[in-house]
Amino acid sequence: MRSKEKMFKIGSMQEFTALALEIFHYQYEQNAVYHEFVDARKVSVDKITQLQDIPFLPIEFFKTHDVVCGNVPPQAIFRSSGTTGMVRSRHLVNDLSVYRHSFVKGFERCYGSPENIQFLALTPTPEQAPDSSLVYMIQKLMDLSSSPENGFFLASHSGLKARLVQRRAQGKKVILFGLTYALVDFASKYADNYSPLIVIETGGMKGKRKEITREELHSLLCPAFGVEQIHSEYGMTELLSQAWSQGDGLFTIPPWMKVMIRDTNDPLSYIGPGETGGINIIDLANELSCSFIATEDLGRMHYNGQFEVLGRFDASDARGCSLMI
């Protein structure tokens, strides 16, 4: 099954639902792990006609199983970050072109062409984290950029400051991606007015520093970088698409992705805007693994279609991009 041409041209909820149901039946037939999970739920596959009926695979399965369609050698294996001894999720990716298309198109919807942007990163380099989907995305965005001054600066905060000051003098449009704890560390030593600058944080402290709320984080980082808003990227190893927040912690998703909030007391039912529950994600770009993921995150939908991430279930492992090192 090859749905790439259709998924990135979705123009309505009807088109999304039709393709999601098509992908569901394909994955039920081709993904042995998902097939077994659906059968264990005693779901009548032929009677699934709406998104709410589709079984969502708990994200923990990516820690214990190869969640993939067919038996084709993967082009890449992305792994979640983790502390020593922690079981890391792994995502077998059979077609990296789908991932590249997804994150480039999703990024362009919010920020425009990467060709016109200089990218800086407070993350490991691709050599230091070759199995990180986040680092892979940042490197590919840098490759598309026309700027010769892109770079990774986790090991050189002073070098980042020099690059930001140089950029400020030249007036270039710059995006700084940063692991949250690394942004906090940089802000504590090199606070300045680097505006105009877009700062995109990519996750919580996750064991590196004391966890703080989003409001506390943004109130710390905004004056340290001289910006009015801190942007955010919501992605994970188990997905091939991202949601983006351009301020206030409100995330927007691309047309080939959908967020549904499940009831914490009844995980097989869904709640409406304004209520807090578990985040379920449909990512059609995951066509060759599993597009229907029940995450460990808590969230809330807004009436305008945006959503916010409020935290994690207490029993979840501490995981995320900030554990990368």
Image (cartoon, rainbow, N blue to C red):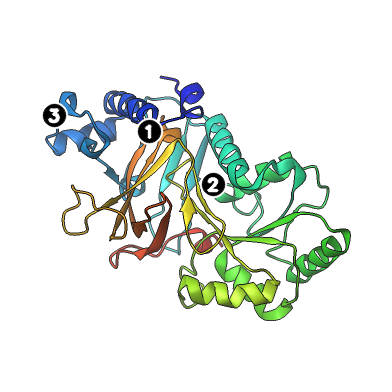
Which of the numbered marks, if any, corresponds to residue 159? none
Q: Looking at the picture, how far across and down is residue 317, in whole percent?
A: 35, 63
Mark 1 or 3 closer to N-term? Answer: 1
Identify which residue is drawn at 22% across, 28% down. Answer: 49
Identify which residue is drawn at 28% across, 25% down. Answer: 25
Given residues 16 and 274, the one toward you in this image is: 274
Q: Please give left or right for residue 180 compared with residue 288 in the image.
A: right
Label 2 vs label 3, nearer the camera: 3
Q: Looking at the picture, how far across and down is residue 127, in whole percent?
A: 66, 50
Identify which residue is drawn at 50% across, 63% down. Answer: 323
For marks 1 and 2, give the CA distance: 28 Å
Label 1 vs label 3, nearer the camera: 1
For marks 1 and 3, give the CA distance: 24 Å
Kind of residue at badge 3: Ser
Q: Looking at the picture, how far across and down is residue 267, in whole percent?
A: 20, 52
Secondary structure, mark 2, is helix
Which of the numbered marks, if any, corresponds to residue 13? 1
Q: Please give left or right for residue 90 compared with residue 21 in the image.
A: right
Residue 184, located in which quarter of the rendered image?
bottom right
Residue corresponding to mark 3:
44
Residue corresponding to mark 2:
133
